Image (tube, rainbow, N blue to C red):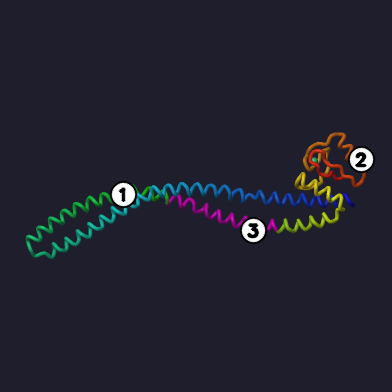
Amino acid sequence: MSNEDLRALMEADRWLERLAGQRATLGERVELTALEADLRERLGVLRAAEARLEPLTRAYDEAAAASSRLRERRDRLAARLEASRDARESAALSGELDQVRDALGAAEDRELEALVELEPAAETTAAMRREAQPLAARRAELIATLAALESSLDEEIAAQRLAREAAAARVDGALRARYEAALVRAGGAGAAQVHEGRCDGCRIALSPLDLDRWRHAPEGAYPECPSCGRLLLA
Ligand SMILES: [Zn+2]
């Protein structure tokens, strides 16, 4: 039954290799990597836009504060003028009030100009953040999905490793040593089958001579594939 034990070990190793391949090529991992690259790029563009926005915001805030100070001054002067019963004082207040009104008009113009510059720039950064939101949500979703998928695959791999060790224990010592050496050399599994004249481990065709050697090998001999070195099952 040695051939069947060796076959079972080969199948167990092939199954392990498939699981490892599955874990390494999860579509969600590919999507997450691309998504994170996209988000990093967007973040760079957003930071640059925010850097351009900052002086515009400062200029607008300063202009708005200047208007607000002048409005307060105007209101105070208007109240004093209203309360004034002295003709000379009234004339002086009225003159000052006219000056402040002119200055306020100019300040409000500057405030409006600053706002006109600020608004589209602010809208640009706001739009960038809005666009990034669903991507960030998808990223969180992918991370959670991947964690679940990987942990379930890891459980499967752990169970399969135990099954593999049990299968290996049934193969006798010298043959098992040859198998393990071939596994280290070739990767995946340490044995292969001959199918339509080809080694199904490396898919390379055997020469007629090697094919003949394999066909007529004594029981339990398992010649090695000349290309990949895997033991060729009977
Ligand atoms: Zn081969």
Q: CA distance from mark 2 to mark 1?
A: 92 Å
Q: CA distance from mark 3 to mark 1?
A: 51 Å
Main secondary-structure element of the magenta-colored stretch = helix
Assess disc 2: are there few (<14), some (14-19) or many (≥20) residues with their C-alpha within 10 Å of its C-alpha: few
Amino acid type of the residue tagged 1 in the rendering: Ala
Assess disc 1: are there few (<14), some (14-19) or many (≥20) residues with their C-alpha within 10 Å of its C-alpha: many
The disc, 3 or 1, on the residue closer to the chain's N-terminal end is: 1
Residue 91 position by quadrant: bottom left
Q: Are marks 3 and 2 in contact (CB under 8 Å)?
A: no
Q: Residue at x 76, y 56 (%)?
A: 161
Assess disc 3: are there few (<14), some (14-19) or many (≥20) residues with their C-alpha within 10 Å of its C-alpha: few
Residue at disc 3, CB closer than 8 Å to ligand 1: no
Q: Are marks 2 and 1 in contact (CB under 8 Å)?
A: no
Instruction: For mark 2, give the secondary structure.
Output: loop
The residue wearing badge 1 is 114
Region of the chain picked out in magenta, as a range: 126-154
Please tell me in which quarter of the rendered image ligand 1 is found.
top right
The residue wearing badge 2 is 216
Q: Which mark is residue 148?
A: 3
Question: x, y percentage for residue 88?
Answer: 7, 60
Q: Residue at x 46, y 52 (%)?
A: 130
Q: Is residue 141 magenta?
A: yes
The disc, 3 or 2, on the residue closer to the chain's N-terminal end is: 3
